[in-house]
């Protein structure tokens, strides 16, 4: 949620949280989630960071899909959404393990697998790693190289998901939003440098 603010979102709501890292973030209990999805001002929904696979996750992903909001899907939310993504505007942000779980049959180079996954899902895929690859369903691809070795620490992927939410909420092309979010993420890491932890990215 904090990364969304740092990356340019004008208004961020954290649903189901207990507290927020910044007073500018609106915190709501999970009971208000479905109603919030009907808010016309809501530009994008980020689901997955810190949310384990569960019936509750399946329910919340289904509600977001039904609402037709642009989505950023991370971690277990990727698996929950894939069977019914359809024409939903979405960015998927899997790391190596999550990619293998969601697309176990894909082979070839990382670029080939990312392209195939994007085409199959009908969504933009950010295949994370030291050589992050961003692929769109129409075949466009970008490689973020060199990245930053300091991003190989817990929680930095959650920050990227928040940045994707901010970029996606701004409207425009989904692939361009994903590329912009990855660029923001790497640039912030380079400014901080050695010893970076995920919290530093939202304080930068």
Image (cartoon, helix red, strand yellow):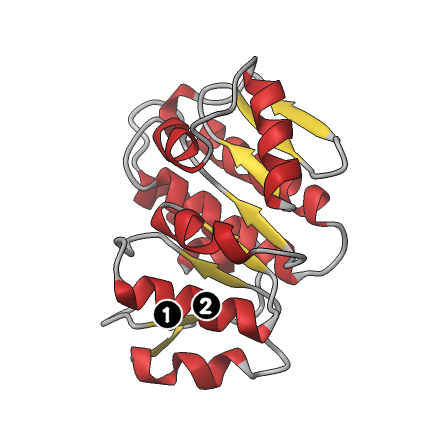
Q: Quadrant of the C terminus?
A: top left
The answer to whether residue 103 of the structure is visible from this angle is yes
Alpha-carbon distance for marks 2 and 1? 5 Å
Most distant residue in the left direction? 18
Residue at 52% in and 44% down: 92
Taking the spot 63% from the left edge, 22% from the top edge, the residue there is: 143
- Give residue 137's position: percent from left, percent from top: 70, 39
Q: Which residue is mark 1?
A: 59
Of residues 195 and 75, the one drawn nearer to the viewer in this rendering = 75
Q: Is residue 14 left or right of residue 140?
A: left
Quarter holding residue 196: top left
| Residue 21 left/right relative to 71 | left
Residue 150 is labelled as none
At which x and y percent is residue 54? Answer: 25, 59
Q: How many marks?
A: 2
Label 2 close to label 1 by CB (< 8 Å): yes
Q: Residue at x 31, y 78 (%)?
A: 30
Q: Callout 1: few (<14), some (14-19), or many (20+) C-alpha neighbours within 10 Å?
A: few
Q: Secondary structure at mark 1?
A: helix
The residue beneath circle 2 is 62
Under circle 2, the secondary element is helix
């Amino acid at each position: 949620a904090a990364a969304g603010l740092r990356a340019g979102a004008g208004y961020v709501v954290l649903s189901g949280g207990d507290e927020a890292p910044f007073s500018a973030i609106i915190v709501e209990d999970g009971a208000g989630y479905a109603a919030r999805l009907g808010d016309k001002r809501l530009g994008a929904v980020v689901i997955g960071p810190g949310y384990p696979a569960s019936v509750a996750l399946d329910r919340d992903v289904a509600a977001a899909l039904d609402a037709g909001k642009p989505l950023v899907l991370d971690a277990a939310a990727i698996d929950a959404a894939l069977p019914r993504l359809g024409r939903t505007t979405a960015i998927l942000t899997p790391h190596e393990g999550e990619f293998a779980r969601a697309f176990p049959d894909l082979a070839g180079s990382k670029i080939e697998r990312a392209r195939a996954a994007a085409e199959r899902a009908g969504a933009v895929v950010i295949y994370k790693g030291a050589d992050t690859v961003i692929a769109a369903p129409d075949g466009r691809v970008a490689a973020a190289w060199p990245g930053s070795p300091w991003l190989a620490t817990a929680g930095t992927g959650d920050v990227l998901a928040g940045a994707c939410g901010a970029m996606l909420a701004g409207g425009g092309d989904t692939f361009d939003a994903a590329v912009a979010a990855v660029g923001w993420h790497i640039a912030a890491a380079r400014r901080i440098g050695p010893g970076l932890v995920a919290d530093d990215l939202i304080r930068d």
